[in-house]
Amino acid sequence: MQGLDFSVVSSYLDIIWVGVWWTATITVSASLVSVLGGILLAVAVLHGPSALRYPMRLFSWIFMGTPLLLQLYLIYFGLVQIGIDIPALAAGIIGLGLHFAVYNADILRAGITAVDMGQTEGARTLGFSRLQTLRYVIVPQALLNTAPPIGGNLIALLKESAIVSVIGVTELVHSAQLAISETYRPFEFYVIAAVLYYVLNLALEGILKVIETRVEATR
Amino acid sequence: MNAASKFAGANDRPMVQVIDAHKSFGAFEILKGINLSVNKGQIVAIIGPSGSGKSTLLRSINHLEALNKGEVWVDGIQVNRPLTGHAFEQHINSVRQRMGMVFQHFNLFPHMTVGENVTVGPIKLRKMPAARARDLAMELLGKVGLQDKYDAYPSRLSGGQKQRVAIARALAMEPSVMLFDEATSALDPELVDEVNLVMKQLASEHMTMIIVTHEMRFASEVADRVLFMDGGIVVEEGPPSEIFSNPRMDRTRTFLKKHLAG
Ligand SMILES: Nc1ncnc2c1ncn2[C@@H]1O[C@H](COP(=O)(O)OP(=O)(O)OP(=O)(O)O)[C@@H](O)[C@H]1O
Ligand SMILES: [Mg+2]
């Protein structure tokens, strides 16, 4: 049996940091895609023209009903065949973002429906259009009210971001694998990766806490 | 009675005019041919039993309810113009800016501070620079006695304070007419006066107002004219002195007997 030796990690910090950086970048970008996409999907399903609603349903069904892994393969390897060539990083962000957008949309749809009718009337009587009412009054309230479950999704997104390694993005797990392939020390590097995920998780939870505090201020 | 209405010339076109308004919900006809005309600066109180259609009439003026038949005119513009789709949307959004509406349950935006509630309309709709909107909001909040609540969230306010903010929010659009739907019904009794006081102040500034209310005393104090509605029609209308002391119709008398008692 080989003894554990964490000192080996120090010579591979560069590559590990690359992994942390890309995991953080992918998480932040995909989170934005998932929240903005979730808003658009929810609003389209609730208020969009009926011509839009069925394509949206199909879209939701595809992203909810199939594995994320398959979705990434389809976006990265599949779309090239029909002439849409998306770089790996962008494909990862889009895939991860849309996957979680569908779940966020479900939560937001309920959140939007739960906003009191009086809010719409209050805004409309001031002279706000339907779209302005959604943008300034309804959606912000729905977002505030659904911050906890959406925050939960973003935490899940951070963890699921590891899957983007399958299309060759050097995120944290992938960078650990690169170091392992040179050192044959899987235990040390996977433990380090786990610790770093935990730290990233704490950072994300910290951000979500700040948002929650902001929400509490309005209650 | 205020001066503006007293001296309104015969040629003055009304600020608000409702012509033969009909409205049904399903099989039930709630408004059965209402006519209403309110001159600039005039204050009209609408009273009547629950379910008589007072809210429906007020909401029709703002087009929160679409009439099945009849016309609504505000400030020389037909509110329910026979337009469709996007054209109607644009029309209604602009004509609504001429009306301030105050609801029983305030409908303040809970995610915005008091200041933001009052400035959002001027900034987003009237394209007012933020600094000017802030000045305007401060002035209006001063008027309703709530300048110090500029940065508070509505959840921190009492019902009376919320309603005063709602009035300031409506006034920030500089409307030609204010519509009040039982602005004090949801308030604890001790908070009613502070809101009534603000409405009286508006009256003294010759704001055109239509006030749906259950408070007969307030109606008699503030209104130039009182409308008694029952069963979707205007049963009787006239100056408060006539309606309250000397009603002509039996239905008015029965209603008032119930509501003036005590
Ligand atoms: N959206 C709606 N759909 C169906 N019926 C409605 C709707 N709005 C109002 N009604 C009915 O229309 C009738 C008149 O309602 P309205 O709210 O105008 O009465 P009101 O005079 O304001 O009564 P109150 O003094 O209780 O506020 C009521 O019977 C009510 O149930
Ligand atoms: Mg009513």
Image (cartoon, coloured by chain):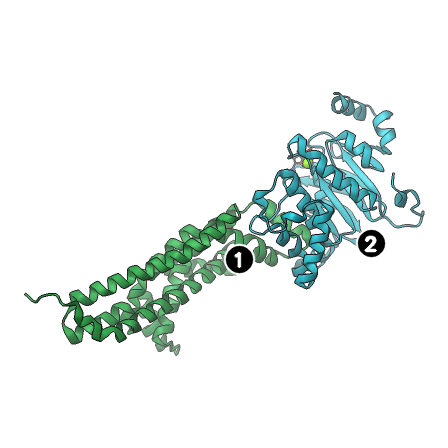
The hue in which chain A appears in the rendered picture of the protein: green
Residue at 79% x, 42% y is B201
Judged from the image, the secondary structure of the residue bearing numbered disc 1 is helix
Judged from the image, the secondary structure of the residue bearing numbered disc 2 is loop
Which x, y percent locates residue A93? 38, 68
User: Would residue B262 appear left or right of A21 to someone viewing this image?
Assistant: right
Residue placed most toward the observer, B19 or B56:
B56
- Amino acid, disc 1: Ser
Q: Nearer the viewer, mark 1 or mark 2?
A: 2
**Circle 2 residue:** B76
User: Would residue A173 appear left or right of A114 to someone viewing this image?
Assistant: left
Relative vertical location of residue A89 with respect to residue A31 in this rendering, above or below: below
Which x, y percent locates residue B229? 77, 33
Residue A67 seen: no
Q: Kindly identify which chain the residue marked by label 1 belongs to.
A: A
Residue at 68% x, 64% y is B129
**Circle 1 residue:** A50
Q: Kindly identify which chain the residue marked by label 2 belongs to.
A: B
The hue in which chain B appears in the rendered picture of the protein: cyan
